Amino acid sequence: MCSFVFSTVPTDRVDFNRIMRLRGPDVTKEHSLDGYFFCHNLLSMRGDYVAQPYVPDNGEIVVLFNGEIYNCPDDYDSEARYLHDQYLEKGTGLFRDLDGEYAILIVDFRKGTLYAARDCFGTKPLFFGSKGDDFGFASYRDALTALGFEGIHPLRPNHFVEYALDGSSIVSAETYLFNIAQHDSDIEGWFSAFDAAVAKRVRHLRGTPFVGLSSGYDSGAIAASLIAQGARFMSVTVEGRENPEVIAGRIKAVEASGNRAITIPQEDLDVDKWRRWLKDHVEDEPYFIVNDDGERLEVNKSVHTDKAALILAGVCAKAKENGALVYLSGSGADEIFSDYGYQGRKFYSHSNFGGLYPQNLLGRFPWSSFFGSTQAAYLAKEEMVAGSFGMEARYPFLDVAVVRKFLTLRADIKNEVYKSVVRSYLAKHDFPVHENEKIGFGFARRKKRFRLW
């Protein structure tokens, strides 16, 4: 988890970095070149690092990076150096070859061009703002606001932008492409892709990764994969919100694997404390949710008052206290593998087709929450909350290979049971789950449950 800013406005006049620096507590480095200003806050995941912005000796190319590149070779001591070398070799073709969760800025002064990219699902934040001829990019809207920019918007996920520094050309292009022909019956192939996605997200870590373990499908699948692969991790569970029998079985499995299972009684979550934390450490990024019918269902929702954000803050604090730096999130599973529904029944109004995948995805793909809507809103929330603790969130369900494998599975396999691939994965590993029920975020007395029969 890092953060950065690039600006044509001098950055030494205001405190633009108040919230952003929480994401990168290890090293902050500023740099200016030819009237352009760079700042990077680093969270070192391995213990050794090369500070950014990465500026080779000739100063012709500057790289800023946030996230993780999983196919960066082990012999590179810095992913920023790897991105630099890949850019020299492939140009913008490098983005299509990246396997990772990232926000990237490359400024090529030889060409007078800036390149900005977000990963497929926009897991790492990146905003753009302008005012007159000035412009800037930053990990958080707050930084661009402090620098006086207006019209601030997030860059689109699954796109990279070529931006001429003189403003004469701005071109946006799609990065990753998907085959939506549902022809495959190899669910074991999805299992393998998911295990690989989990494995790559826990390699080369300083500290212990953690799972926010509930009694539901998604966190259970992550924990089951970690156990099956013999990985080191910890789980953190808020008691009083979950099915006690399922949680007891899961904690037993975690501890039997030699890992630590931490529980937090719900009454010990100091809601007022974490509400103040969010107000002081997390920018109030408003979000809205839509569905495929174009209905704006939730507009200008506040992270500061979001129940799930309050719970996540308490969970992250406990995990950080026990040495965790990486949060393995189940985010994205509802948006892609169930559409918040089953057999046409919508659990929430923002479901697009009630979880009943059509026989042909042409004309339906991408549905609203595949890249946007709840996908964008909930990722932003998790990134901001985890980032406020100097922790990096990682998302195995949003691994491009995992999603690609799911999309090509036959519709009848997708529709066989609720969250078909995840449920089948849990069954394969005999991992307990609170079956046939969707539990919404919130505190126990208010949480929503949806029976599937």
Image (tube, rainbow, N blue to C red):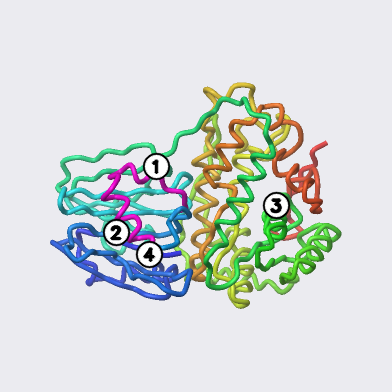
**Earlier along the polypeptide chain: callout 3 or callout 4?**
4
Can you tell which quarter of the image residue 258 is in?
bottom right
Does residue 441 show up?
no
Residue where numbered disc 3 is placed: 221
Classify 10 Å Cα crowding around label 4: few (below 14), some (14-19), many (20 and above): some
Q: Along the polypeptide, which appears first: circle 3 or circle 2? A: 2
Seen at 76% across and 48% down, the residue is 426
Residue 225: x, y in percent? 69, 55
Where's residue 393, x and y in %? Answer: 53, 60
Q: CA distance from mark 1 to mark 3?
A: 28 Å
Is residue 94 covered in magenta?
Answer: yes
Residue under the image location 42 percent in, 74 percent down: 48
Chief SS of the magenta region: helix
Left or right position of 54 against 399:
left
First in sequence: mark 4 vs mark 2:
2
Res. 392 in view: yes
Q: Amino acid at mark 4?
A: Ser
Residue extent of the magenta highlight: 77-101
Q: Which residue is mark 1?
A: 96
- Secondary element at tag 3: helix
Q: Are marks 1 and 3 in contact (CB under 8 Å)?
A: no
Q: CA distance from mark 3 to mark 2?
A: 36 Å
